[in-house]
Amino acid sequence: MPAADENADADNPYLREPPTDFAPIEELSETEAEQQVEQLREAIRVHDRRYYVEHEPVIADRTYDTLFARLQALEDEFDLAHPDSPTRSVGGEPLEAFETVEHVAPMLSIDASGEAEDVRAFADRVQREVGTVEYVCEPKFDGVSMEFVYEDGWLERAVTRGDGREGDDVTANARTIGSVPQRLHGDYPEFLAVRGEVYMPKDAFQDYNRERIERGDEPFANPRNATAGTIRQLDPSVVAERPLSVFFFDVLEASDLADSHQAELETFPDYGLRVNDRVEVVENIEGAIEYRDRMLEARDELDYEIDGVVIKVDDREAREELGRTARHDRWAYAYKFPARAEVTTIADVAVQVGRTGRLTPVALLEPVDVGGVTVSRASLHNPAEIAEKNVNVGDTVRVQRAGDVIPYVKEVVEKGSEGHYELPATCPVCDSPVERDGPIAFCTGGLGCDAQLRRSIEYYAGDDGLDLEGLGEKSVRQLVDAGLLDSVADLYALEREDLTDLEGWGETSAANLLSEIEASREPPLADFISALGIPHVGPTTARELAREFGTFAAFRTAAEAEPDRLEDVEEIGETVAETIHDFVTSEANAVVVDEILEHVSPQEADTGAGGDELDGLTFVFTGSLEGVTRSEAQDTVESHGANATSSVSGNTDYLVAGENPGATKQDDARDNDVPIVNEDEFWALLAERGIDLE
């Protein structure tokens, strides 16, 4: 789990795929209730952060609502209320990347339920406290809620909801959204703070996700995540390129307040503020329930995601009298929709091009709940399976998760199309012809295909390659898009000015990357073989190949002319041997490898046997070591019986930290109680075990 979850109890059952079939409260002892309350509080804090701050929720909204309701019920029944409980405060906190700004008025959450009786209970309380009222009913948008402040008609600032009291100043990004007026029109008040919901239309979301998949980027899970990830971009030009929109739906504060919510909304279009056309005023709560049922039926017709409706007291004076709790306004209630369960519609199909050129069709779905997780895409595997299941765009399908992890289309429930989806005849990225190998389809563009190129550079520079710090997915994309990298070999032609002219690069970061690249010109043979990205050849297999052949030339010759000899290497069978042979004999790949070898001279590997002095130990290395590379240090410990891995886990025995070590690996080591040793301590440890490196 990410940073928000690092301190959470790993045994907490409510963190991932939580159970919602709780035992009756009356069957719990006080001790059992206290334990469950603590676990629920801990889990809800984690889920609040995932949702409000990181925008990467791991459970569905209805599952969260069930956990929250259970916590409230337990606190009430056993008198366990506490000021620090999530039931007493709004989840989330501002990100540090933006200036933190206090809201002009609290942006609280809304009490919610999926049960009609709870909605009627809300209306009964309103009736008792303020008498008969009318209600304004609105769709409950599933986007990012924000405060927009206008002074003298000009947009002064736009702030995310944050923790409800203060949020992130994202004004520069908000100004790029076409439906956010920079200046109000008409007879507007001198000061106006309004609440709006920024969202990505569903059609635009599917188009945008398709583009991301086809260019090799990870797609967004749902429109809300796409919106949240966009509005917090540090570069407003990135926001301007993404299809965001906004509905304005409430007044937070104004120099001239209307008497009712309906009157406020009626003035919004006069000011240039966009409102939703599905808003209705009803006379009583039964009218509100009927409104919700109509919106549920119309849900799939809308071009924006909603997960229920919001019912608000219309009269502002009655609102003031009803007041608020620490968490929510008492004059509003959300009547939630049931989660879409497993059955949904295929909105589109995108084709992802992998590092090896394999084409993977991905179904873009109307978001659906599958086992407590919201899913908006699913694998279609390959053309043969698509034909067998007769799957196409527009079909209603049942989605499941393989091993409760990877979503896939299990079957067609109802046909909404003719025939089945056909893969394109040419690559969606480079237009090269597509060839079939049994049920699998491949782009023939090789490393000349941008999708394969980018992924190849990322792999070459990654943990399983030459481990070039500072050259991750984002920076590779930036360098490729800037025209600085047309092949892996172009890495060695980069100059300081090439980098410092790019957004986000300074003298220090440029110098550090160029230093990493320079140091990679004589890599250990195993690292170089792994870095080439040969299918099925990762670091472990690459080390076995290096030990077997000693030099890259010997390995390449054997792979080209004697593929049967590869099968003598441990962990390599006939299939992997054929894959290696196909890779090295590919004309396109051979050109790229030759270009790299003009700049790189892989070291000769030791083909002799080592000792077992470090048998059973696992090492991870970070930072630069004096006199040896990390790969040489890995080879040293492995030649004496140890394992060398790229990431820290509970099975790691030592993290060796050189100069400029990575913060993530050190944090992981502390979290897993793994000893962190410096270079001197590392060499001393080897000496203590009788390893003489002279």
Image (cartoon, rainbow, N blue to C red):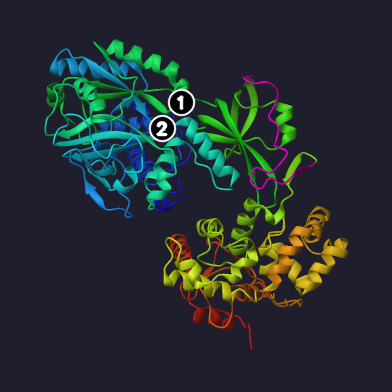
Q: Position of residue 416 (x, y in %)?
A: 62, 19
Which label was assigned to residue 79? none
Residue at the image position 38 percent from the left and 30 percent from the top: 66
Q: Nearer the viewer, residue 659 or 438?
A: 438
Q: State the extent of the magenta-drawn residues as a range.
A: 415-437
Question: Visible in this render: residue 401?
Answer: no
Q: Quick one: SS at disc 1? A: loop
Which label was assigned to residue 339? 1
Question: What amino acid does circle 1 point to?
Answer: Ala
Taking 52 as reference, is 74 above or below it?
Answer: above
Taking 639 as reference, is 253 above or below it?
Answer: above
Task: From the viewer's perspective, tell me whether residue 647 is left or right of residue 616.
Answer: left
Can you tell which quarter of the image residue 92 is in? top left
Can you tell which quarter of the image residue 246 is in? top left
Residue underneath mark 2: 61
Residue at the image position 79 percent from the left and 59 percent from the top: 587
Q: Position of residue 146 (x, y in %)?
A: 29, 39
Q: Position of residue 274 (x, y in %)?
A: 31, 29
Secondary structure, magenta segment, majority class: loop
Task: From the viewer's perspective, tell me whether residue 531 is left or right of residue 436.
Answer: left
Task: From the viewer's perspective, tell me whether residue 391 is left or right of residue 82.
Answer: right
